[in-house]
Image: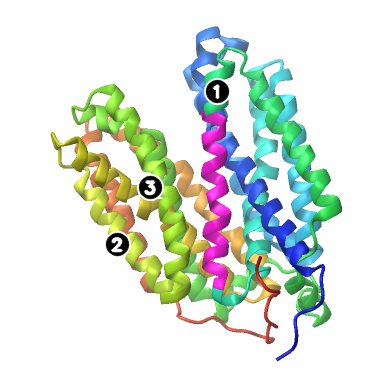
Amino acid sequence: MTSAPPSPIPGRNAWTVVLCWITVLLEGYDLVVLGAIIPTLLKTHHLGMTAGDATTVATLSLVGVAIGAVSVGPLADRLGRRLVLIGSVVLFSLFTILVPLAGSVTVFAALRLVAGLGLGACMPVSLTMMAEHMPAERRARASTLTMTGYHTGAVITSLLALQVTDHWEALFYVLGAAGFAVAAIQWFRLPESEAFVRARRADEASARVPFTELLKPAYLRAGVGVWIASFMGLLLVYGLNTWLPKLMNDAGYPVPTAVTQLLVLNVGGVVGLVLAGSIADRRGIKGTTLGWFAAAAVMLALLSVRTDSDLLLNTVVFLTGVFVFSAQVLVYAYVTSFYPAAVRGTALGSASGIGRIGSIVGPSVSGALVAAGIGHPWGFYFFAAVAALAVLAVLTLPGRGPRPLEEPAAQPAV
């Protein structure tokens, strides 16, 4: 066994953990920033924006994120994780700061689209770097730890939105400025992934790694299963975050109770992330992901049943958050464990990008059910069926991944 290098490796790992976590926090912040200001934009008729315009802006933002997530993988596997991550943060920050300066709804939407390109690239690269700086046996925890930043960012936006009220522009200025500050620190402090460096030296990643690499027999079965599971997982995450209060209200719960359930759901999500990573590293990522999606299906089905007990309702919603949000992240953890370094960035980018399509479909289908007057109980039936399909997708995943070259152990975790 080789001895650990003398320092400053622990410090390098610490910077990787902190900076990747903060980068994902920025995406969590952006997740709810548009939803937080849409009521104000419509109330003040900013740029003459209508409800239809707001829907278009929100959709284009998610489309940009999806394209960025799919496109970043080959770049990260060719140019390196570090430069691609820094470039993505700069792109996202620049166009975010420009959003309040838009002179028309079209420009507003275009700026959100381009900002989404950079933002979509941030998460898969951050997850890849975190996984590659952890020992293989702790990669599930690396993914779930990183994703706690996502929910933290969402909470920060919610708190800031309550303070700035009509001065919504400040939310974008704060986000853009924070992004530039993070990119500057990354330039000086973020080390390149050593797994990527080793892969380049072995000529695994010296050439461009195209998306078609994932269609080769060694990866195809895992790829299809991961894409379907990721699609279903993000459909649940975005569908529930968008429509849970309305579905609860349609079930007969008063508005304050319905809105409170969204907070309970996300608190459960944070707890689930902490638990899922630890359990998956001990029991196996595939089996844990399977159990998590199955439990999510049961909890979602139970939400269709009206109850007069606040304790029972809060418990079921909390458990739904525990299983739904972390099940999706465990899919990413499987990718970082299954694929070798040469194609890991491409694989994670494709999983995130295809999953983003689910993030667009989920709110759309849920909204259609609500508009048809059948949001409750059919919205929850729909979500339960989606979780069941994710279970079937995970069942198809191989247990172990191919390793063209032996990957040396990652540096000690912080």
Residue annotated with mark 3:
268
Nearest to viewer (mark 2 / mark 1) = 1
What's the magenta bit mostly, secondary-structure-wise?
helix
Q: Amino acid at mark 1?
A: Ala
Disc with the residue nearer the chain's start (3 vs 1)? 1
Separation of residues labelled 2 and 1 (CA atoms) = 35 Å
What is the span of residues highlighted in magenta in the rendered image? 138-158
Q: Quadrant of the C terminus?
A: bottom right
Separation of residues labelled 2 and 3 (CA atoms) = 16 Å
Q: Which class describes the residues within 10 Å of circle 3: few (<14), some (14-19), or many (20+)?
A: many
Answer with the quarter of the image where residue 198 lies. bottom right
Residue annotated with mark 1:
161
Give how far across and how far down residue 232 sits, in percent: 41, 54
Local secondary structure at mark 2: helix
Local secondary structure at mark 1: helix
In the displayed structure image, the side of residue 193 where residue 242 appears, left or right: left
Report if residue 151 lies within the magenta region.
yes
Q: Which class describes the residues within 10 Å of circle 1: few (<14), some (14-19), or many (20+)?
A: some
Disc with the residue nearer the chain's start (2 vs 3)? 3
Q: Residue at 56% x, 33% y: name it.
A: 156
Q: Residue at 25% x, 27% y: name it.
A: 249
Give how far across and how far down residue 245 sits, in percent: 33, 31
Residue annotated with mark 2:
294
Q: Amino acid at mark 2?
A: Ala
Q: Residue at 60% x, 74% y: name it.
A: 339
Q: Quadrant of the N terminus?
A: bottom right
